[in-house]
Structure formats: structure tokens, C-alpha cells
Image (cartoon, rainbow, N blue to C red):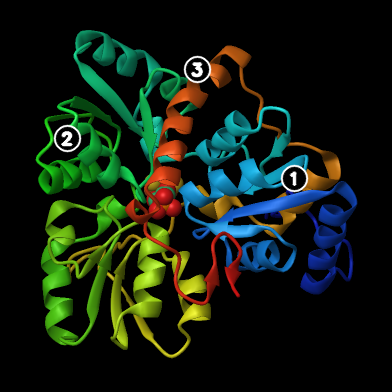
């Protein structure tokens, strides 16, 4: 029988507390700060908060990394998050526990065909979701995240601009419906949110008539239509804390439940359905790339200084313009962005 060989063998007698302690010590010794997304393992989220880092949505991760004085940022999330951190802080070293952690939206929008579409529509303002490569951002006029996409596209519509939107078609469709903007949509989806099912959600709602439905806008239109609140990961977290309800059906990655349970311990959270009643195979509603971030990978990247984000200087300069536009806009229109839940310090977590 073949033995299963761990890539990251623990030393004999190694324990979770010992491993945690080594990572804390490495962060301290290297003067590094940990910037984590809500979808990564709860262990890493807790570590980030306990060591002065942050757990946040993709917009707040970008701001936090840019503004933090540490010269070494460790980004626990997926590749585009590390690239955004590097573009905003080219002089800092940015490490990721797992460089192979990507995103189906990034994979679904290769720069060649994307640039061709942009060339074919020179009359349209190019707006890309954060979940794209640095090369795609370098070709765009604006970057947006799910926190501010609606406000930014409304603003462009008011200025009479037509939009070329990439890559998430569900989010693009939702924004188009809400704003009435003229939008040409790229056709890619998130493999996690695309799995939520509207018919099964209807019957789950009948079983839990008092539950509020919270939906991330990367979900299909039939799921979004049933939502009491649609929003970014931070907006959904805020809804659980602030809404006057005890029960919630949540259509987003299961990783967010960790922080929801910490900030709203008395409330009942139910996962939104991902398959029909007769299905034998259901999605776990957890991003396989976010799941690549573990304590062992984090320890290795800090100890061996591996997993550095390297980007071409020209790409950094060109991609920065569209990110800065978004950050300037959100700084000028703070109400356009879902505020963090009450009792919660933005970027840092519970006060
Ligand atoms: P947020 O910007 O809401 O954190 O979403 C990022 C993401 O990848 C959701 O799938
Ligand atoms: Fe990409 Fe979806 Fe994973 Fe978010 S959850 S990183 S959108 S694949």
C-alpha cells in the first residue's frame, strides 16, 4: 500500500498550539502583518486578528495592506488579492501561503480575449471586478469590488457612460438591473456562488418562514431575487449582526460563518441550498482555492520566504490607475460602501 506523504510534515510531538506559536513568532520576527479574507480557515482569521492584522472583504484588504506600515504583507486569500496588495504597495514584499490559489473568475477572463473585446468597444468604459489578473486590471478604466460596484456603475451611468463589464455575469446582471446602465457583460461565474439553487431556496424559506435571506451578488439572479439583503461579505456580516432577526439563510462561502458566529453568537445560520433534493452530490459552498491557505503553508512561506508576488513594473503602473480610481471614489463617497458591523473596527474586527 502506498503511504500518504504530507507535503508539510509536522515535527514529532508537534501540536496545533505549538504550530500557532511558531507562526506568531515568525510574524513578529519578520515584522510581517497578516491580511486575511473572511473565506479562509477560521484558524488563520483568528491569528490575523490576534496579531494586529485584519480579516476583511477584498476592498478592505486592499486598503489595509496599502495603509499598514509593515514592509512585509502576508495575504491569506486568493491570487488576485495578493496582486492587488502588491500593485498598491510595490515597495513592500507581499507573500502568499499558496501562490496557486486562484479564482474561477480570474481564470475565466484571460487577458488576450478580454483586450480584444475592449478594442472592439472603444466607446465603453471598462469596469472590472477585483477578481481578475493584474494584466486585465492594466487594461481597465475602473476596478470595483462587490462593496462598491453598484455605486460606481450608478455614477458612470449618471455621467452618460456605457460600460463593458467583466468578468462575473451574475454580478454584472444584478448591477444592470439595479442601475439601468447600458452594460456589455463578460460571461464568467464564481464556481461557489453559481451553485446556489433558487427552487430549493424557495422550499427552505417555507420551512423557515422567519429567516432572513442574505445573498452575495455573485449568485444567480433567481437566488438574488429572494434576498432580504444582497451585498459583499462585509455587508452580509453586518446584516447578521444588525438585522432584527434570529435566523438567517446565507448564500455565500461557508468560510464567512466563522466570523458571523463570533460577532453574532446567539443567531442561527443556515446554509443556502446548493443542489436539488434528489441530488447525490452537493457543492460544499466552500472555495477550493481559499481552502488552500492553512497554518502549515503560512508557516512555510514566512520561514522560507517563499510565495512572493512578483509583477512586471509596467503592469503595476497601469493596473494601479483603475484601483486608485475606486479607492478615491470610496474615500469621497463613504456611504456608498457597506459599513462594517457595529462593535467592529474596520479591518480589525470586533472592538
Ligand atoms: P468580497 O469582495 O465580498 O470579499 O468578495 C470576494 C470574493 O471572492 C467573493 O467570492
Ligand atoms: Fe473566486 Fe468564487 Fe473563490 Fe471568491 S469564492 S475567490 S469568486 S472562486
Looking at the image, tell me whether mark 2 or mark 1 is earlier in sequence order. 1
Q: Is residue 254 in view from this perspective?
A: yes
Residue at point 37% right, 63% down? Answer: 235
Cα separation, mark 2 vs mark 1, equals: 37 Å
Direction from residue 52 to residue 152 in the image, left or right: left
> Callout 1: 10 Å neighbours few (<14), some, many (20+)?
few
The relative height of residue 49 versus residue 308 in the rendered view (above or below) is below
**Of callouts 2 and 3, the N-terminal one:** 2
Q: Quadrant of residue 157?
A: top left
Residue 138 lies in quadrant = top left
Q: Are marks 3 and 1 in contact (CB under 8 Å)?
A: no
Q: Secondary structure at mark 3?
A: helix
**Camera-side mark, 2 or 3:** 2
Tell me the quarter of the picture where residue 179 sits.
top left
Find residue 236 and report its horizontal and vertical position in percent. Answer: 36, 66
- In this view, 25 is above or below 153: below
Question: What is the spatial separation of the Cα atoms under label 3 and label 1, in whole angstroms?
Answer: 24 Å
State the mark number for residue 32.
none
SS at badge 1? loop
Disc 1: which residue: 69
Judged left or right of residue 241, residue 1 is right
- The reply to whether residue 2 is in sight is no
Count the numbered circles shown: 3
Q: Nearer the viewer, mark 2 or mark 1?
A: 2
Front residue of 253/122: it is 122
Q: Earlier in the sequence, mark 3 or mark 1?
A: 1
Q: Residue at x 47, y 54 (%)?
A: 57
Residue pointed to by mark 2 = 158
Pointer 3 residue: 318
Left or right: residue 51 compared with residue 81: right
Alpha carbons under labels 2 and 3: distance apart = 26 Å
Amino acid at each position: 500500500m502506498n503511504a500518504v506523504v504530507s507535503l508539510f510534515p509536522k515535527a514529532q510531538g508537534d501540536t496545533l498550539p505549538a504550530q500557532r506559536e511558531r507562526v506568531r513568532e515568525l510574524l513578529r520576527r519578520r515584522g510581517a502583518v497578516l491580511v486575511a479574507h473572511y473565506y479562509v480557515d477560521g484558524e488563520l482569521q483568528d491569528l490575523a486578528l490576534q496579531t494586529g492584522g485584519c480579516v476583511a472583504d477584498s476592498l478592505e484588504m486592499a486598503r489595509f495592506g496599502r495603509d499598514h506600515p509593515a514592509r512585509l504583507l502576508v495575504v491569506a486569500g486568493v491570487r488576485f488579492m495578493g496582486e492587488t496588495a502588491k500593485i498598491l504597495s510595490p515597495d513592500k514584499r507581499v507573500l502568499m501561503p499558496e501562490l496557486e490559489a486562484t479564482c474561477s473568475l480570474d481564470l475565466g477572463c484571460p487577458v488576450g480575449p478580454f483586450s480584444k473585446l475592449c478594442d472592439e468597444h472603444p466607446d465603453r468604459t471598462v469596469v472590472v471586478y477585483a477578481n481578475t489578473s493584474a494584466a486585465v486590471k492594466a487594461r481597465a478604466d475602473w476596478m470595483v469590488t462587490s462593496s462598491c460596484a453598484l455605486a460606481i456603475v450608478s455614477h458612470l451611468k449618471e455621467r452618460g457612460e456605457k460600460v463593458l463589464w467583466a468578468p462575473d455575469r451574475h454580478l454584472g446582471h444584478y448591477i444592470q438591473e439595479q442601475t439601468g446602465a447600458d452594460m456589455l457583460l463578460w460571461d464568467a461565474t464564481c464556481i461557489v456562488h453559481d451553485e446556489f439553487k433558487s427552487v430549493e431556496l424557495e422550499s427552505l424559506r417555507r420551512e423557515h418562514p422567519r429567516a432572513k435571506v442574505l445573498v452575495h451578488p455573485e449568485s444567480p439572479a433567481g437566488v438574488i431575487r429572494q434576498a432580504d439583503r444582497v451585498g459583499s461579505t462585509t455587508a452580509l456580516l453586518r446584516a447578521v449582526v444588525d438585522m432584527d432577526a434570529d435566523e438567517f439563510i446565507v448564500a455565500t462561502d461557508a468560510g464567512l460563518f466563522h466570523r458571523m458566529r463570533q460577532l453574532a453568537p446567539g443567531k442561527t445560520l443556515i446554509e443556502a441550498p446548493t443542489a436539488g433534493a434528489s441530488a447525490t452530490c452537493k457543492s460544499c459552498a466552500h472555495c477550493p482555492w481559499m481552502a488552500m491557505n492553512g497554518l502549515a503553508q503560512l508557516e512555510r512561506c514566512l520561514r522560507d520566504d517563499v510565495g512572493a508576488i512578483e509583477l512586471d513594473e509596467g503592469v503595476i503602473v497601469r493596473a494601479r490607475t483603475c484601483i486608485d480610481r475606486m479607492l478615491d471614489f470610496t474615500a469621497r463617497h463613504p456611504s456608498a460602501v457597506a459599513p462594517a458591523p457595529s462593535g467592529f473596527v474596520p479591518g480589525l474586527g470586533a472592538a
